[in-house]
C-alpha cells in the first residue's frame, strides 16, 4: 500500500545531506512533470493536426518513446524520499522500535542491491546505444539520451537509499522513536486525524476571515 509519510529534520550531518539531495530530487521530479506537460501538448498538436489539417506530428511515436524514460524515472528518488512507493506493510506496519528499524534496514539493503545491478545493466545498455549510434525507426532520433536517463535516475535513487541506510542504522543503534531523513509512514488513523485537523483549521480560518470583514 501507499501511505502518508513525513520526514523529520534536524541539524545533524545526515539531515543536511538529506535536504541537499532532496533539492536535486525535487528538481528532477519537476523536470519529469515538465516532460509530461510537453508530451500532453505534443499529443494535442498531433490530434488537432491530424483532425484539422490531415497533418500529424512527424515522428510522434518516436518522441513519445523517448519521453517515457524521463516521465517514468526522474521522480523515482523523490518518491522514495517521501515514502510514496507502493509497498506491502501488513507485517512491517505492526513492528515498533528496533525491530521496525531492522526490518526497514534489511528492505533498503535489498533495494540498494537491486538498484546497483540495474545501474550496471542500464549503463551498459546506454553505452552500447551510444557506441553504435542507435536511433529510432521513424525520424532517426538518437536513443542514447533517453537511455542515459535510466542509470542517472537510478544513481540518484542509490544515493537516496544510502542515506536511508544511514538513517535506519542510526535509529537502530539509538533506538530512536523518530529518526531523521527517513520516511515515517503514518497509519490510516494518524493520516485521517491530520486531514481532519487540516480541514478544521481551514474552516476556522475561513470563519475568522468572514468575521473580520466590515
Image: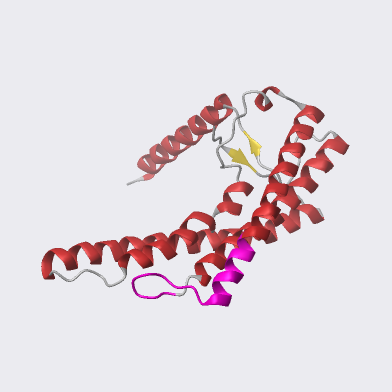
Q: Looking at the picture, how far across and down is residue 23, in whole percent?
A: 62, 61
**Which residue is drawn at the image coordinates 69% and 61% (left, top)?**
20
Residue 145 visible from this viewpoint: yes
The structure residue drawn at horizontal position 59% and vertical position 27%, both measured from the top left corner, is 187
The residue furthest front is 132
193 left or right, relative to 7: left
Answer left or right for 78 relative to 109: left
As displayed, is residue 92 above or below residue 105?
above
Vertical relation: 51 (above or below) 177: below
Residue 118 at what x, y percent from top left? 64, 54
Front-lying residue, 197 or 8 = 8
Residue 71's x, y, as percent? 46, 58
Res. 38 visible in picture: no
- Residue farthest toward the right in the current orientation of the protein: 173
The structure residue drawn at horizontal position 58% and vertical position 28%, both measured from the top left corner, is 190
Q: Answer with left or right where residue 26 lies relative to residue 50.
A: right
Q: Quadrant of residue 105?
A: top right
Instruction: Give the vertical position of 137 relative to 75 (above or below).
Output: below
- Locate residue 73, reporting x and y percent: 53, 56
The question of residue 135 being in magenta is answered with yes
Q: Is residue 183 left or right of residue 143?
A: right
The magenta segment = 122-141
Q: Quadrant of residue 43?
A: bottom left
- The structure residue drawn at horizontal position 83% and vertical position 43%, both measured from the top left corner, is 170
Amino acid at each position: 500500500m501507499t501511505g502518508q509519510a513525513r520526514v523529520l529534520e534536524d541539524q545533524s550531518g545526515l539531515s543536511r545531506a538529506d535536504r541537499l539531495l532532496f533539492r536535486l530530487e525535487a528538481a528532477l521530479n519537476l523536470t519529469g512533470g515538465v516532460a509530461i506537460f510537453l508530451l500532453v501538448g505534443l499529443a494535442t498538436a498531433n490530434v488537432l493536426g491530424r483532425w484539422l489539417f490531415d497533418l500529424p506530428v512527424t515522428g510522434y511515436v518516436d518522441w513519445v518513446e523517448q519521453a517515457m524514460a524521463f516521465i517514468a524515472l526522474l521522480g523515482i528518488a523523490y518518491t522514495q524520499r517521501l515514502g510514496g512507493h507502493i509497498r506491502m506493510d501488513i507485517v512491517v506496519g505492526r513492528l515498533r522500535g528496533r525491530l521496525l528499524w531492522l526490518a526497514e534496514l534489511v528492505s533498503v539493503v535489498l533495494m540498494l542491491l537491486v538498484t546497483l545491478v540495474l545501474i550496471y545493466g542500464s549503463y551498459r545498455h546506454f553505452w552500447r546505444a551510444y557506441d553504435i549510434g542507435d536511433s529510432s525507426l521513424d525520424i532517426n532520433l538518437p536513443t542514447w539520451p533517453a537511455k542515459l536517463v535510466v542509470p542517472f535516475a537510478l544513481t540518484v535513487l542509490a544515493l537516496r537509499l544510502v542515506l536511508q541506510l544511514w538513517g535506519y542504522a542510526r535509529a537502530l543503534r539509538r533506538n530512536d522513536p523518530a529518526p531523521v531523513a527517513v520516511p515515517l509512514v503514518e497509519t490510516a488513523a494518524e493520516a485521517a486525524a491530520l486531514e481532519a485537523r487540516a480541514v478544521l483549521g481551514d474552516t476556522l480560518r475561513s470563519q475568522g476571515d468572514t468575521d473580520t470583514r466590515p
